[in-house]
Image (cartoon, rainbow, N blue to C red):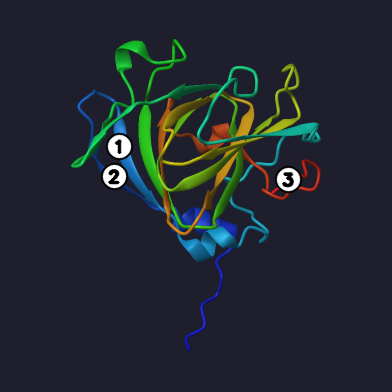
Amino acid sequence: MESRRRLSRCEQLRVGMTMLTLGTGAVSGIKVEYQTIDTLAARDLNAPCECSMTLIPSSPLPKLRKHVETKSPFSGRISLPVDVSMNFLKKHQDERGYFMEVLRLSCIEPKGFQPAQLSISETRSGVIKAFHYHEKQSDLFCPLTGSFRIVLFDMRSKSSTCGNGYSIYSDVRSPFLLHIPPGVAHGYQVLGDAAGVMLYVMNRIYDPADEGRFEWNDPTVAFPW
């Protein structure tokens, strides 16, 4: 049997996360991309990385104070970090399939969010992609297919929820847009047997210099997986 070496995380970033541009949307300035993830690359998360995209936080990471879980189907008040919001989407479904409106540029929540780039990521079952964060960029996450555990960790020192961790379990029954502001580290794990497809909407063109990362199992944070 042919032996296959597991790729390091640096190799994952260089090789496994190659993007293929599909085209430009109808709205001027919005780029649509499709991203594929190599499973072997994504699973080897403990390999040392010297890649310039992986940034060490300039200040010590806060320790996890508490962890809150929310599961689909959602009901009642949902606990989220300060300035993180979740807007639920409506599926119009019949025997032919479904239609779902995701975003209206004229009335985006939160107010002031201006889309600059749209990307789609397909990630295979069992893969963890976490954690990364931005100093300026805000994101909208929209799970399209599969089951996700979306994870958040508030790193903002002046936030009342600093040090809190959150896990949001999503599935196709309860579609939503999740707004993640700068300073909130985020990522996800794909659950179940099928791959998961995630739509990202960003308010800035991706800039590696704006991105920071730390490992999913960082001992200081000690996020409960």
> For residue 79, what is the image quadrant?
top right
User: Callout 1: 10 Å neighbours few (<14), some, many (20+)?
Assistant: some
Of badges 1 and 3, the one in the foreground is 3
Left or right: 174 in relation to 159: left
The mark tally for this picture is: 3
Residue highlighted by disc 1: 32
Q: Amino acid at mark 2?
A: Thr
User: Marks 1/3: CA distance?
Assistant: 34 Å
> Mark 3 touching mark 2, by CB under 8 A?
no
Left or right: 42 in relation to 118: right
Residue 50, x across and y down, in percent: 64, 54
Determine the residue located farthest toward the front in the rendered image.
95
> For residue 96, what is the image quadrant?
top left
Q: Nearer the viewer, residue 75 or 166?
A: 75
User: Callout 2: 10 Å neighbours few (<14), some, many (20+)?
Assistant: few
Residue 46, x across and y down, in percent: 68, 59
Residue highlighted by disc 2: 21
Q: Secondary structure at mark 2?
A: strand
Please tell me which of labels 3 and 2 falls first in the chain: 2
> Mark 2 touching mark 1, by CB under 8 A?
yes
Q: Nearer the viewer, residue 71 or 44?
A: 71
Task: Residue 59: tell me if it is visible.
Answer: no
Q: Secondary structure at mark 1?
A: strand
Residue 224's disc is 3
User: Marks 3/2: CA distance?
Assistant: 36 Å
Q: Is residue 93 above or below residue 12?
A: above
Measuring 55% from the left and 35% from the top, which residue is drawn there? 209
Measuring 33% from the left and 46% from the top, which residue is drawn there? 34
